[in-house]
Amino acid sequence: MNRKPHEEEPRGLAAGRNIMASLAPALLLLGCTGQPAPSPDAQAFTLSDTMMARIGLDTVRMAPVENTVELNARITPDDARLASVYPIVGGQVTAVDVELGDPVHKGQPLAVIRSSQVAKLQRKLIDAQSDVEVAGKNLATKQDLYHSQLLSERKLVEARFDLEKARAKLNDVQETFSIYRFEGGSQYIVTAPIGGYVIGKAVVRDATLPEDHGDPIFTIAELDRVWVMADVYESDIARVKEGMPAEVSTLSYPGMVMHGKVDKIINVLDPRTRTMPVRITLPNPGVMLKPEMVAHVRLAYLEERELPAIPAKAVISDNGRHYVMVFKDRRNIETRAVTVAHAGAATCWVEAGLVPGEVVISEEHLFIYDALNDR
């Protein structure tokens, strides 16, 4: 539009020119730094007393970087609290009294096996008792002869030795009968050696077991304490040490974290998976954790470096970048870009953008960020 030299400019156009002139420095700053430009009212921003009472302030400090190793794991019984039950005789299984997963107490019948070998064991017991009786009478006779000087001392010693052998044989047979239950001349009652839960069962009713049966027919485990067996990849082996704190979680109980520590490192590498097993022992009240349950383990360790550390909740993520609100006073708050080196659950370590001693806002900081950056 052409105007005469002394013609006044329209008021709306003049006002527009003044607003653009006032915004020019802010636009120039945004173009140069790439950070959100403060609003025209940023200079006048002041925290009220109410907001000052609500915000959280934290001082930047130097701290060792805490990192984690994430491991896949599974729940297994404690080997020291596990019992495999083997049959001592072969024969026909006439009854099975428990099923997989059943709780059992020590001495509880598990199965009944009818076997001719039971009769043989009973005959062996009778023979051993008879041998002890005969050897005892023989020793008494030879003692009388020895005292009458009709028998040499060597013969007396031999009689004593025969009695000791007979007693040892009887003790062996009696030990067998004290451990195992035999009834009715041919029945062998398989009982639980410990209390716990049946986690393995390899026998059914009417099955016939051979005399040389070498596999367990039941496996019983005490499950009030279990092992978490985690697999450490070869690249993480140097980071894992005994005594490291461990957090264990499972798919079955989302949100529940159980705490333990690495109590054993099995220094053998699986050639198929290239992993090394480590063990974490956990109490198991209510038998919440079941054998073969899948678990996830997080191990925490400290890196050999220190970086400025702030609460993780103080970091604001916006368009792929990270910012913090640096607090100087209620009228002087800066939006500052930072480079995050590592973010943990509660702490964030910063590679660049902060120095120790500075103060950041960690509560109600999103409202301040929005207000200062015209969100």
Image: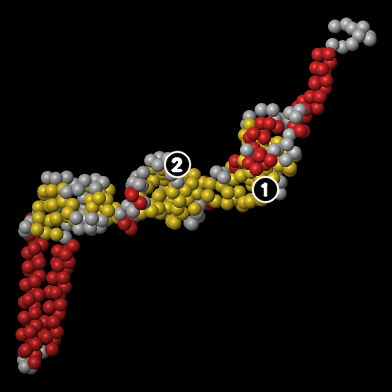
Labels 2 and 1: the sequence-earlier one? 1
Please say if 44 is above or below 219: above
* Residue situated in front as seen by the camera: 119 or 49: 49
User: What is the number of callouts on the image?
Assistant: 2
* Residue situated in front as seen by the camera: 265 or 23: 23
Question: What residue is shown at x 17% (from left), y 49% (from top)?
Answer: 97
Locate residue 346: give its quadrant: top right
Question: What residue is shown at x 8% (from left), y 63% (from top)?
Answer: 122
Residue under numbered circle 1: 59
Query: Whole-percent x and y of residue 188?
Result: 12, 56
Query: Whole-percent x and y of residue 216?
Result: 23, 52
SS state under label 1: strand
Query: Whole-percent x and y of residue 14?
Result: 84, 15
Quadrant, the C terminus = top right
Question: What residue is shown at x 13% (from left), y 52% (from top)?
Answer: 112
Which residue lies most toward the front here?
49
Going by the image, does 298 lie left or right of 130?
right
Question: What residue is shown at x 17% (from left), y 54% (from top)?
Answer: 109
Quadrant, the N terminus = top right
* Residue situated in front as seen by the camera: 15 or 347: 15
Query: Whole-percent x and y of residue 185?
Result: 6, 58
Tell me the kind of residue under disc 2: Gly
The residues bearing labels 2 and 1 have C-alpha atoms spaced at a distance of 30 Å
Tell me the kind of residue under disc 1: Thr
Circle 2 Cα neighbour tier, 10 Å, few/some/many (<14 / 14–19 / ≥20): few
Mark sitting on residue 184: none
* Residue situated in front as seen by the camera: 14 or 233: 14
SS state under label 2: loop
Locate residue 127: give its quadrant: bottom left
Going by the image, does 112 lie left or right of 235?
left
Residue under numbered circle 2: 255
